[in-house]
Amino acid sequence: TNPCNNQVKANMVYQKMLLEADAVDFDDLMLKVIELFKNHPEVAEIYQDQFHYILVDEYQDTNSAQYTLTKFLCANLYFTKYKKLYKN
């Protein structure tokens, strides 16, 4: 059997179990918030007004969902490049 088919089937079972349990996993948490912000900009605005500063650590490791969520939250902020200098 094709290993990809097994992975697809396992993911389908996993997603069905989450749905039946009315649960989400970590990735879904971000995706659901992004969906909420896209469908209800007034909700996004509430959270955009909550933060004056947002620090993104290890930005180079940010995935697409994390980037999109950060972009929503930073809509009203100015960006500055921060570089930490280390001493040996």
Image (cartoon, rainbow, N blue to C red):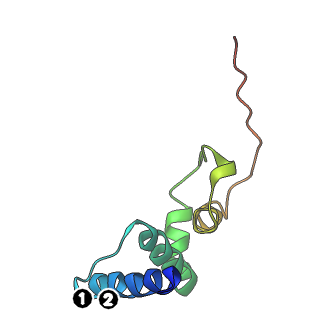
| Residue at the extreme top of the image, as rendered | 88
27 relative position to 16: left or right: right
The quadrant of the picture occupied by the C terminus is top right
In this view, the residue in front, 63 or 7, is: 7
Q: Amino acid at mark 1?
A: Glu
Secondary structure of the residue carrying tag 2 is: helix
Q: Nearer the viewer, residue 49 or 55?
A: 55
Residue 38 image position (x, y, % from top left):
57, 82
- 55 relative to 86, above or below: below
Residue 16 got which mark?
A: 2
Q: Can you identify the residue that label 1 sits on? A: 20
In the rendered image, the vertical position of residue 22 relative to residue 85, given as above or below: below
Q: Residue 7: image x %, image y %?
A: 45, 80
Residue 82, picture quadrant? top right
Element assignment for label 1? helix
Distance CA(mark 2)–CA(mark 1): 6 Å
Most foreground residue, 10 or 23: 10
Q: Position of residue 74 (x, y in %)?
A: 64, 60
- At 63% from the left and 44% from the top, the residue drawn is 58
Q: Amino acid at mark 2?
A: Lys
Q: Quadrant of residue 10?
A: bottom left
Tag 2–tag 1 contact (CB < 8 Å): yes
